[in-house]
Each structure stands twice: as structure tokens, then as C-alpha cells.
Image (cartoon, coloured by chain):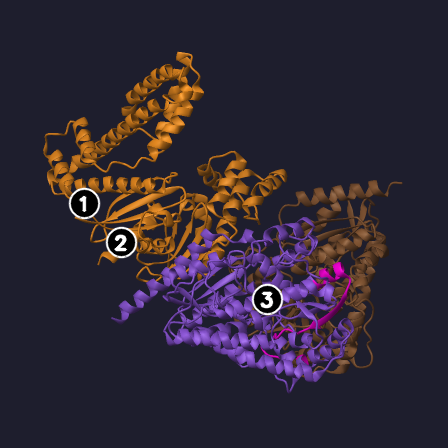
């Protein structure tokens, strides 16, 4: 999830490492046809990276391609390309950025052609659109498609029947198709080893997220957080590289905590901490840095975010478990943030508000993503009612630059932060 | 014998009544009765009926409801049905509903299930999942579990167990309902001037509110009346309307399409009425029968995964062939993810089969019919031109 | 005396309010937000300071009980005369600037004739100026640009015809000059203007004029200034002197009506609902989302579509006998929906009533989103001046929230500036 960053931007060792990892994966994709490596396309939430690794397949993530194109400000024309081809302006911009990219020769964000997938692994987790997206890709590629239906946690928890359903699909649908597509036999011990490696990285990842409980927070858990989730949410979970990355990141953050330092802004400066916020919703990628700047210019640090939970809710204790490999994968898929029902999501945010001593909740409502967005106004009302802290609402989009109005966003953000400050003043005055 | 106009008058009355008097009366008539609301596109109504409950289709507020509080919960880029449905509830119009079921139509309806839990804690709100895997021992097993959980919830509401016998009896009644519904659709496909689309729609809408026994009598009477009356036939083109399986099209939109010169000979309105393509077995294990019917004998639509790429969209081609239609109108609600994401795929398939189509969007409260009339009228004319040798 | 100034830089007008230490309003000023925000801000502030002087004069006069009968007439005369003097000053500036523009290279051949024509135009404009400010005279606008512009065009056309000159170059020169004049910061001296105004009403010798002199001698100390409004980021103020319009609006409404708990503002570009506590502190706010459906601009589109003035829509709607249901407040579809209804044979006034209801329904949703109406309710913004909108609002508030006191202040346009000035007062301690 790291994006393009201009030359003058200061990079820490962990960032450089992640950059190398991502570049290496794009290298594998670019060379797949030459090397004969089989390619699987799949989604971030509920992805089965440890399983995919068992088949030596290269992982291509359309969402990440859309994000990368968004951050490189290339998504606008791609979306318009898809709309020109009959896709509605109303629907998800990730889908359109992806289809637009394919229509224009499938040139990836790094400028090299992406290979056609040998298998579409449709992990249908927490987002209805995924299903249609892969049906659209399937119509284009006419390739083997494995559907993994992950039931929604409508009652707020995973039931035994749900886990059994997912495990059965893994065993009887997904694994046989992966075997066929890759020509490699499934080895459950290899899966166990990968899961063991995942769990190591997950420990450090959770430590990183929870470091934001310090005052000042050494990290920004949203704008920085989207970099931190990169390896573990994508093609690297279960690799030694990911474990090393989180070890390195952890040591960098530990140093900041020791120094009493806050997060570092993209221009390498100290990020002041005047407001501690919890943020719900994905970021807007084409305006990512502009959006972030609005926060750090005002001294707003995000101490917890829900977007960094779309690829797994590790801070609630989940770890991939080598002793229950398929069950553990099923539980992982079921527990991703947007697969949890709305009351659970609200409870989680309420808990973050308390645990991270936040001043308020900011919702970035994303036009593309109804899975996140439908119900957020109730969420806002509930969090205000339960915590007595103010919440605010801004609206942007994932990768459609037409839906990011800087003046509008800045106006609301400033109004909101000033409101927090005014309330603080009132509370202080009442206490005096 | 009742005239079709009288029957349709009654349906119109039920349709216009945003307080659901018919369902309230049904509930009040016998102590202990309960009402289970459901949203489109599908729930197993047999189970609710078997438990002694009334399945009530909750389909938004239409074009006559002013939405204030429902709008407060939704951004402008979200479709209309959840906001008007919330408005109905917030304003007390659904205060007699004991439980609400939210089928897995899309993320918006899915999330609405959680909103309902928070906003109306006294109502049993449940997200009702259906499998996207169609193997009996995988998706089927999961679905039997879902149905069993629903059965338990209904037993709680009924305060008595829901027996297999009761479910089998309900399946038989709903089989009868589906046979009658299919007969109405078949009549219309054969002689669309005898059963105008707006009438058929109203007739089906009544089935969302009335008890199935009464709806069966109504369908029967309509079939008899419609066959007996002679109505003028017009030189209309024959079209299939698709995309309108969740948020309801305004009645005026349906009328406008026909007024513009298109007979609607098939549609995907109120799919729950004819979800299973033929009878559900009324003997043996009734839960297994319902699950089996879902997996192997139910219609295709956007919220349901199509495992076979080669079959994608063919249901629409088959509908065109079966009803002798000449084109397809995609009428999708604005911001409807499943319908709008599916649309380009279906269009590709139609184009491959040389079936003409047009597309427009609506909201349940759309007021402007002029563009619809123009497009449908042009479509009807162009179909006639194409079909000339 | 200590003065606390709030400036609200809006998208169409810029407002300023001057408060004294006791939070009493000393003066209000308004001007059009021209291309130069800095100047707009200075002009509004200057206007508010002029009004402040008038307040001081009035306060001084209040100490002369024998004159109470004459005070109002005197103040009205003084005001008109002062405005006239101000107008003449600006006219002189405009005249000079127009003349300068005729010296452009492209007028090498015609420049002389044009200068003569311009001289003639301004002679007439100066001559008719006193009538514009005569007792009982009605002006369409108080902004110099509007008054001078409409008169210049009328007079210049006549002059051009008489001199057999082309009108277009004159208009072109005017267009360039008015922008320059309008964007020239005001000279903040006003004593001279007051004295000339006094002379004009022949009041320079008596006790009334003494009061004016005394009022002019009171030093106005610019103790603190706070800016707000959509254009606030462009204000030449340090960051800590800038407050969001939401906060200012909430506080301003609280100052007008201390029991206000909910504020609705429907402006041209956005609609906001603000909840404030007993001290005027904002507790929650909601604005229309990205979609501008149902804002004042919607009425603007409708007016354009109907070929009517914006201010005529409300009165037309009031004539309705029934309300046509309009379901779309989308500005993009407004015209189409309107034509559709007209084509169906609906009456214009009934459609208008429906459109006003649609806008207010949209606002009701935003209010509901912000937490509903809990106590006194204050309605501000341009749409609050529209009687049909107010009527629908009253009805819907009553239906949804019961009997609630609804406040609509004729000075509601100054709500944000008032709040900003109050912030300035608070910051100064």
C-alpha cells in the first residue's frame, strides 16, 4: 500500500524495505509469462496468501493496482475509460479503475504489462462488489475462477456452521482449483509453516498499532497506518520478508517512543499532536498527501483507524494458527472488519475511542464503498451518544479524483477541530 | 365473478396504504399472531407462514412518502430504498412488525440489518444469508443451518415449535401461489393487452401484504376475470424489463413504458413471488426441500453468483425467447450496485445474441417520466424498424 | 474605546460587525465579495466602522433629551448626506480612472472624444446623485458598483448617441475602471465625509453638530479582529484569528437568541444545521453532502428556468392552492422536473410551492442528521428571507418537533460576523 513518493521525501529503513518488497512482487508479475510462474488474482480482505504461497503462485491484487494508480494520479482517466465502456458512474471506482486499466492494455502502475491471471480467487469477504468485480474479470479473461463465499457475521460473531462452510469450500473448491491452476500438489505442512511465519509478523504488527496508545503517539495510525498494513494485508503475509519488515518497523517506533517523538510527516518533519482522532473509512488515494497534510497542519494525529483492519482484526487477538490451518484461515476471513456487522463495528470504534484516549471520531465516507459507508451516519450518532465526544463526517472517494473537493474537506475538518478545541475550553472553564 | 378492475382497485388501495392496514388487521384478528417483514429479493416465506406469522414485504416508501429522518442516515450516493424504509419505521408505520429479515442483496441492505438492531432493539432484526456455493454438501449444508436458525427465531416469536408438517403444508400453499403467479405471467406473455404490466405489478404487490391464502384467491379471481374480458390490443413491441429486483420502480414508470409502446412481457419485479422455478417438494424433509430448491431450482439475478461463466446472462436470453420478446429494458435503481455492476455483463451477452436493449435508471420516487417515455417510445419504434424484413 | 471586529468573507457578500466591550453591536457593514478579498474585507470593516460612528452619534444624542423629536430626522439626513458624499467621492475616483483608461494605446485616435464624453457622463451622474439619496428615494442596491454601474450605462448610452460615438468603448473603459476602483482599498478617514455631510444639511453650528464632533473624536481602538466565512483562508489574518463559519454562526445565533439550541442556515452554496449549547458552543454540525441539492442555488436555477427574479419565487409560491409533490432537489434535474410538471398542466404557483417544500424537506433531513430540534430554533441565510420557504419550514418543524420557538432575524446575514466579533472579544479577555 505504499505509494509513489517524491524524491525529497525522507524515508525510513522500513519504508525502503517495503518499497523493495512491492517492487519485487511487480517484477514477478511482469516476468510471470517469461518465467512460467502462475498468477492468481485475489482481493485484500480475506486473502489467502499463505495458501497461495503453497502453490508458488504470484499474487496480483487488483485493489492494490487501483490504489497504486490512484496515488500516482493515474486513476481518473482509467475510470472514465470504463465509464465510456458502459460502466455506471454510480458504482465502485476500484472496479472501474481496474477495468479501465485492462481496457488500456493492462499496463500496471509501474508501467509494465500485468499478466493475465491463471486463476481468479474470489474471496467474497465483507464486500458485495467483489463478486461482480470478478464476474466481470472472468467474462474478460475466461479463466478458472474459485469462489470462496465468506458469510457475513450478521449476528456479530462467526458460527461453527460458517467456519465449517468456509473450510469445506477451501478444501473442496479452492485448493483443488489452486492445484489445477498451478500444477502443484497441496502440502498442508507448507501451509502450517507459512501460517507460523504470519503469526510472528502479526505479533509485531499489533505492537505497532497499539504504540499509538502512547502520548504523544509515535505513529499516525491512518496515514502512516496504510503503509504499515502493506505487507501483512497483501502478498507478503506468511513470508520472512514481512516478519523482518515488522521487526524493523517496531524498532524504529520504539526509538520514537523513547525520544518522546510523534510520527514523521511525509516531508520528514515532526508531526505535532494537538488532537487525537479515530478515523473510520478508507482514505482517498489520489489526494492522499494533500489529505494527510490537512491533518498534520492542524496537529491532528490519528491514533486508531478501522481501515487498517480491513485485512484482519489482529488487535482483537486473532492470530493465524498453524495447528488449525484451514479453520484459522476461515476465522481470519470471517473476522475482517467489513465482514462484521454494524453494531460490532460501532462497539469497536467505541473501544478505540477509550483505549486510545481519542478526542473524537472522524468518518471519511467513501462514495465507492457501500460496505463501509452505508450506516456511517448512524455510527456517528451512536459514537457521539456513547462517548460524549464529537464526531465529524467528510465525503470523498477511493480513487475517483472527481469526488475529492479540497476546499470542502478542509472546511469541515477545520470546523471540526475548532469545535473540539472549543469544547475542551468549555470543559476546562467549567473545571476551573 | 369479480371484474378485474375491482380486484386491481383493491390492490391499488393496498399499494397506496403506507400504514399497511391489511397486515395490521390480519395481526389484530387473532391474538398471538405476528408479522415478519422482509426486504427484497428473497426469503423463505414458507417458514414464516408455517410458524403462524405473516410475511410482509417491506419495499420502501414509493413516490408518495416524504422522507426526512430516513435521509438523515444516508449519503446522497446511496440508493433510495433504505432511507424510505427507515422513514416508514421511524414514523411508526412499521410498529406492528415483530421481526425484520434482510436478505443478502447488497452491502446497503446488509448494513441496514445492523442499523435496525440499533435503532429498533425490540424488533428481531436478522441478516438472512444465502449460499453462493451451490453444492448440496457445501452451500446446502450451510443453508440448512441458516434455515434452522431462522426456524428457531420464528419458533420463539410463535412461542411454539415450527413442525415439519406445518412447513410442508406451507410449502404446498406457496407452491399454489407460485403456480398462480406463473399463470398470470404466462397470460401476460401471451396476451399482454389483457393483463397490463401495472395491473400485474399491483396484483403481485398485494401478495407482499396479504396472507398467501387470500392472495391465492385473488390471483385465481384475476385470472378468471382477465381471461373473460376483451381489451383492445395495441401494436406494441414486446420487452423484458430487468434490474428492478430491489428498489421498486414507480408505478408510473411501469405505466409509462407501456404507454410509450412497449408491452412488458417479463420482468424481475418482486422476485420472491416466483423465486423457485417450479414446485418445491412438499414431502420429505421440508428444510432440505427448501434448501434444494434454492440451490438448484431458483431464478438468476445479480445478487446471486453464477458459477458457470458460460451460463452468465443466459437467463435473460431465455426469458426473451420464452416470452417471444423483442428487446430488453434495463431499468436499474440509481446507485444499485448489484444491478449496475451486472448490467454491462448482461448487455454483452444480449449483444452476442443480437437482442436489442436500452438502459435507464430510476429512483422509487422519480417524478419525471418524460425521458422514460421518450426512450421507451424510441426503443419500441426502433424494434419495429429492425424487425421489418 | 475598545472595539472587537468580526469579518465574514462569504462567497457573494462580505460582512463585518463591530462590538464594544459589553458585546453590544456598534456597527454592521456589508459589501460584495469582489475579486480582491482583502479589499472586500477592508470595505466591509470600513462600512461597519462608519455605522459605529453613527451609533456613537446616536448615543451622544440620547444624552440630549430635549431634542428627542428631531433626532431621527437628523440621523436620517446625516446618513443620506454621508452616503451621498461617499458616493460622490467614489464617483470622482471612477471618473478619474475612466479618463486614465482612455489614454490606452488602442484609443490613440478616439481618446480625446471619449474623454469629453466621459466628462459629460460624470457631470450628469454628479448632478443626479443628490436625487438618488433624497429622502424617500429607493435604491436597488447600496453597493457602489450596482448604483454607479446601472446609471453609467444608461447615461453613457445617451451621451454616446448625442455625440455620435460608439457606446462599446465607453462601456469597456467603465468595466476596466470599476474593477480597479472597487478593488482599491478604502481610505479609512471618515471625518471629512461626516463634516461635509453636516455642512450639506446645514447643521454645522448647532448642538447636534457638537454631538457629531464629539462622536468623531472618540478613538476607535481596533482591539481584536477575527475572520470567518468560506473564504476565510484567504483573509489577511493570522491563523489563530480565523474561526470556522460553523463556530461563528453558532455563536452569532446564540448572541441574537440566547435560548437557541438549533441553527439552520441555508445559503447559496450550502445548507448547515448546527447544534449549540447554552453558552453558544457548537456541539454538532451537519452540512449538505457533496451534492448541493436543496441549497439556495437550486432556487436560482428555478428562477432562471422560469425567467423570474429570485425574490419573485416566494410570493408566487404563496399563491398556491395545492402543493405539487416534487421529489428531486437535484439542481441538475431541476429544470427538467419543472418542465415535466408544466407539461402535465400543473399550475406554476403549485409547482413553486412544491419546490419550496422540497428544499425545506432536504434541510429537515440535515437537521435530523445533526440531532433534530431540541429547543429554540433559529433560521438564517438568504433563503430565510423567502416567505414560502419559511412557511414550509414552520409547518414541518411543528409536525416533526412540536411547538418550538422559531427565530428569524432581519439581520441574520450578519450572524457569522457577529459570532466572529464575539470570538474576538473572548480572545481579548
Element type at mark 2: helix
**Residue C387 placement, left or right of C136:** right
Chain A is shown in which shade?
purple
Q: Secondary structure at mark 1?
A: loop
Q: Colour of chain B?
A: brown
* Chain under numbered label 3: A
3D distance between C-alphas at marks 3 and 2? 52 Å
Instruction: Based on the picture, tell me whether residue A158 belongs to the magenta stretch.
Output: yes
Few, some or many C-alpha atoms within 10 Å of disc 3 (few <14, some 14-19, many ≥20)? some
* Residue nearest the observer in this picture, B127 or A169: A169
- Estimate the spatial distance between the alpha carbons at disc 2 and disc 1, rounded to whole Å: 15 Å
Task: Identify the image quadrant of residue B82.
Answer: bottom right
| Residue at the (30%, 22%) spot, across then down | C128
Rendered position, B238 above or below A274: above
Viewer-proximal residue among C239 and B58: C239
Provide the residue designation for mark 1.
C220
Q: CA distance from mark 1 to mark 3?
A: 64 Å
Q: Which circle's residue, 2 or 1, is located before the other in the chain? A: 1
The residue under label 2 is C424
Is circle 1 on the same chain as circle 3?
no
Outermost residue, front side = A34
Quadrant, the N terminus of chain B: bottom right
Q: Tell me whether circle 2 and circle 1 mark residues in contact (CB < 8 Å).
A: no
Taking the spot 46% from the left edge, 41% from the top edge, the residue there is C314
Give the vertical position of C201 relative to C5 (above or below).
Answer: above
Report the side of A239 relative to C124 (left or right).
Answer: right
Q: Which residues are magenta?
A: A134-162
Tag on residue A76?
none
Task: Give chain C's shade.
Answer: orange
Where residue A22 is drawn, which disc sits there?
A: 3
Measured from the top left, where is residue A432 in percent x and y? 24, 70
Dot 2 crowding, Cα within 10 Å, few <14, some 14–19, many 20+: many
Amino acid at each position: 500500500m505504499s505509494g509513489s513518493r517524491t524524491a525529497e521525501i525522507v524515508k525510513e529503513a522500513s519504508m525502503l524495505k517495503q518499497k523493495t518488497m512491492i517492487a519485487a512482487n511487480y517484477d514477478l508479475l511482469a516476468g510471470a509469462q517469461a518465467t512460467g510462474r502462475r498468477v492468481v488474482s485475489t482481493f485484500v480482505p480475506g486473502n489467502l496468501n499463505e495458501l497461495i504461497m503453497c502453490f508458488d503462485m504470484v499474487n496480483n491484487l487488483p485493489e492494490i493496482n487501483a490504489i497504486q494508480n490512484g496515488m500516482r494520479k493515474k486513476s481518473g482517466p482509467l475510470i472514465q475509460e470504463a465509464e465510456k465502456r458502459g460502466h455506471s458512474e454510480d458504482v465502485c471506482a476500484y472496479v472501474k479503475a481496474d477495468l479501465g486499466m485492462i481496457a488500456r492494455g493492462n499496463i500496471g502502475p509501474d508501467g509494465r504489462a500485468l499478466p493475465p491471471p491463471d486463476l481468479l480467487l474470489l474471496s467474497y469477504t465483507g464486500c458485495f462488489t467483489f463478486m461482480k468485480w470478478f464476474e466481470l474479470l472472468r467474462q474478460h479473461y475466461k479463466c478458472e475462477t474459485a469462489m470462496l463465499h465468506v458469510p457475513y457475521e450478521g449476528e456479530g460473531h462467526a458460527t461453527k456452521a460458517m467456519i465449517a462452510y468456509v473450510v469445506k469450500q477451501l478444501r473442496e473448491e479452492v485448493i483443488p482449483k489452486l492445484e489445477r491452476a498451478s500444477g502443484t500438489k497441496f502440502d498442508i505442512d507448507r501451509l502450517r509453516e507459512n501460517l507460523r511465519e504470519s503469526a510472528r509478523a502479526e505479533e509485531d504488527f499489533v505492537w505497532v498499532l497499539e504504540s499509538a496508545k502512547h502520548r504523544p503517539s509515535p505513529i499516525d495510525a491512518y496515514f502512516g497506518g496504510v503503509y504499515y498494513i502493506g505487507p501483512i494485508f497483501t502478498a507478503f503475509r506468511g513470508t520472512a520478508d514481512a516478519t523482518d519488515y515488522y521487526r524493523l518497523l517496531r524498532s524504529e517506533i520504539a526509538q520514537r517512543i523513547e525520544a518522546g517523538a510523534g510520527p514523521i510527516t511525509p516531508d520528514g518533519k515532526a508531526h505535532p499532536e494537538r488532537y487525537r482522532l479515530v478515523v473510520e473509512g478508507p482514505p482517498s488515494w489520489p489526494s492522499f498527501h494533500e489529505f494527510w497534510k490537512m491533518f498534520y497542519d492542524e496537529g491532528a494525529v490519528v491514533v486508531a483507524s478501522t481501515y487498517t483492519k480491513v485485512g484482519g482484526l489482529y488487535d482483537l487477538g486473532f492470530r493465524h494458527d498453524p495447528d488449525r490451518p484451514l479453520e484459522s484461515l476461515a476465522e481470519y476471513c470471517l473476522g475482517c472488519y467489513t465482514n462484521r456487522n454494524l453494531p460490532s463495528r460501532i462497539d469497536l470504534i467505541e473501544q478505540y475511542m477509550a483505549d486510545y484516549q481519542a478526542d473524537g471520531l472522524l468518518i471519511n465516507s467513501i462514495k465507492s464503498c457501500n460496505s463501509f459507508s452505508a450506516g456511517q451516519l448512524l455510527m456517528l450518532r451512536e459514537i457521539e451518544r456513547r462517548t460524549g465526544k464529537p464526531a465529524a463526517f467528510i465525503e470523498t472517494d477511493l480513487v475517483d479524483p472527481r469526488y475529492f473537493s479540497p476546499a470542502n474537506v478542509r472546511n469541515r475538518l477545520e470546523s471540526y477541530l475548532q469545535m473540539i478545541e472549543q469544547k475542551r475550553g468549555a470543559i476546562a472553564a467549567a473545571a476551573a | 365473478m369479480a371484474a378485474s378492475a375491482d380486484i386491481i382497485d383493491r390492490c391499488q388501495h393496498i399499494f397506496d396504504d403506507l400504514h399497511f392496514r391489511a397486515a395490521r388487521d390480519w395481526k389484530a384478528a387473532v391474538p398471538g399472531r405476528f408479522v415478519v417483514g422482509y426486504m427484497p429479493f428473497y426469503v423463505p416465506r414458507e417458514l414464516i407462514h408455517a410458524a403462524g406469522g405473516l410475511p410482509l414485504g417491506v419495499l420502501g416508501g414509493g413516490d408518495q412518502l416524504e422522507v426526512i429522518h430516513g435521509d438523515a442516515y444516508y449519503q446522497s450516493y446511496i440508493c433510495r430504498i433504505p432511507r424510505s424504509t427507515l422513514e416508514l419505521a421511524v414514523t411508526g408505520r412499521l410498529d406492528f412488525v415483530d421481526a425484520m429479515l434482510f436478505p443478502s442483496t447488497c452491502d446497503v441492505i446488509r448494513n441496514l440489518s445492523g442499523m435496525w438492531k440499533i435503532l429498533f432493539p425490540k424488533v428481531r432484526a436478522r441478516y438472512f444469508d444465502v449460499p453462493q456455493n451451490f453444492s448440496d454438501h457445501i452451500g446446502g449444508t450451510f443453508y440448512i443451518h441458516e434455515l434452522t436458525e431462522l426456524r428457531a427465531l420464528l419458533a420463539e416469536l410463535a412461542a411454539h415449535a415450527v413442525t415439519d408438517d406445518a412447513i410442508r403444508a406451507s410449502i404446498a400453499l406457496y407452491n399454489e401461489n407460485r403456480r398462480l403467479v406463473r399463470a398470470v405471467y404466462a397470460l401476460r406473455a401471451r396476451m399482454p393487452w389483457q393483463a397490463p404490466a401495472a395491473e400485474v405489478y399491483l396484483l403481485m404487490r398485494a401478495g407482499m401484504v396479504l396472507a398467501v391464502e387470500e392472495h391465492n384467491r385473488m390471483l385465481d379471481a384475476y385470472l378468471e376475470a382477465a381471461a373473460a374480458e376483451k381489451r383492445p390490443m395495441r401494436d406494441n413491441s414486446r420487452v423484458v424489463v430487468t434490474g428492478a429486483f430491489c428498489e421498486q420502480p414507480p408505478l408510473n414508470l411501469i405505466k409509462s413504458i407501456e404507454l410509450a409502446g412497449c408491452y412488458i412481457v417479463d420482468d424481475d419485479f418482486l422476485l420472491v413471488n416466483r423465486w423457485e422455478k417450479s414446485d418445491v417438494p412438499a414431502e420429505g424433509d421440508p428444510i432440505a426441500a427448501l434448501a434444494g430448491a434454492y440451490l438448484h431450482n431458483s431464478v438468476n439475478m445479480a445478487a446471486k453468483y453464477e458459477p458457470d461463466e458460460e451460463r452468465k446472462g443466459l437467463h435473460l436470453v431465455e426469458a426473451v425467447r420464452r416470452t417471444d420478446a423483442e428487446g430488453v429494458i434495463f431499468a436499474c435503481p440509481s446507485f444499485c450496485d448489484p444491478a449496475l455492476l451486472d448490467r454491462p455483463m448482461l448487455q454483452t451477452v444480449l449483444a452476442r445474441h443480437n437482442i436489442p436493449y436500452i438502459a435507464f435508471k430510476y429512483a422509487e420516487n422519480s417524478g419525471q417520466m418524460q425521458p422514460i417515455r421518450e426512450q421507451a417510445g424510441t426503443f419500441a419504434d426502433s424494434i419495429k424498424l429492425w424487425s421489418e424484413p | 474605546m475598545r472595539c472587537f471586529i468580526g469579518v465574514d468573507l462569504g462567497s457573494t457578500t462580505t460582512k463585518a460587525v463591530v462590538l464594544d466591550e459589553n458585546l453590544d453591536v456598534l456597527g454592521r457593514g456589508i459589501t460584495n465579495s469582489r475579486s480582491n478579498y482583502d479589499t472586500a474585507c477592508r470595505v466591509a470593516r470600513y462600512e461597519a466602522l462608519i455605522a459605529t460612528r453613527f451609533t456613537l452619534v446616536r448615543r451622544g444624542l440620547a444624552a440630549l433629551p430635549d431634542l428627542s423629536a428631531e433626532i431621527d430626522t437628523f440621523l436620517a439626513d446625516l446618513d443620506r448626506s454621508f452616503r451621498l458624499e461617499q458616493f460622490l467621492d467614489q464617483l470622482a475616483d471612477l471618473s478619474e480612472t475612466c479618463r486614465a483608461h482612455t489614454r490606452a494605446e488602442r484609443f490613440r485616435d478616439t481618446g480625446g472624444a471619449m474623454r469629453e464624453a466621459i466628462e459629460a457622463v460624470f457631470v450628469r451622474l454628479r448632478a443626479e446623485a443628490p436625487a438618488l439619496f433624497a429622502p424617500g428615494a429607493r435604491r436597488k442596491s447600496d453597493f457602489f458598483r450596482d448604483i454607479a454601474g446601472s446609471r453609467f450605462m444608461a447615461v453613457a448610452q445617451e451621451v454616446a448617441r448625442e455625440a455620435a460615438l460608439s457606446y462599446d468603448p465607453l462601456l469597456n473603459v467603465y468595466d476596466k475602471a470599476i474593477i480597479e476602483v472597487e478593488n482599491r482599498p478604502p481610505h479609512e478617514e471618515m471625518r471629512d465625509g461626516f463634516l461635509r455631510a453636516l455642512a450639506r444639511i446645514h447643521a454645522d453650528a448647532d448642538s447636534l453638530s457638537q454631538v457629531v464632533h464629539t462622536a468623531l473624536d472618540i478613538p476607535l481602538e481596533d482591539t481584536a479582529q477575527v475572520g470567518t466565512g468560506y473564504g476565510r483562508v484567504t483573509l489577511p489574518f493570522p491563523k489563530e484569528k480565523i474561526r470556522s463559519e460553523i463556530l461563528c454562526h453558532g455563536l452569532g445565533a446564540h448572541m441574537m437568541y440566547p435560548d437557541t439550541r438549533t441553527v439552520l442556515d441555508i445559503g447559496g452554496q450550502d445548507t448547515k444545521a448546527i447544534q449549540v449549547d447554552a453558552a453558544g458552543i457548537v456541539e454538532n454540525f451537519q452540512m449538505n453532502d457533496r451534492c448541493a441539492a436543496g441549497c439556495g442555488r437550486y432556487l436560482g436555477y428555478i428562477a432562471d428556468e422560469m425567467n423570474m427574479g429570485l425574490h419573485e419565487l416566494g410570493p408566487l409560491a404563496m399563491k398556491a392552492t395545492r402543493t405539487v409533490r416534487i421529489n428531486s432537489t437535484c439542481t441538475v434535474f431541476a429544470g427538467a422536473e419543472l418542465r415535466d410538471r408544466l407539461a402535465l398542466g400543473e399550475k406554476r404557483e403549485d409547482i413553486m410551492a412544491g419546490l419550496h417544500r422540497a428544499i425545506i424537506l432536504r434541510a429537515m433531513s440535515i437537521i435530523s442528521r445533526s440531532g433534530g430540534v431540541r429547543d429554540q430554533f433559529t433560521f438564517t441565510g438568504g433563503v430565510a428571507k423567502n416567505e414560502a420557504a419559511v412557511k414550509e419550514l414552520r409547518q414541518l418543524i411543528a409536525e416533526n418537533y412540536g411547538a418550538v420557538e422559531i427565530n428569524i432575524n432581519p439581520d441574520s446575514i450578519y450572524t457569522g460576523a457577529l459570532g466572529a466579533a464575539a470570538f474576538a472579544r473572548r480572545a481579548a479577555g
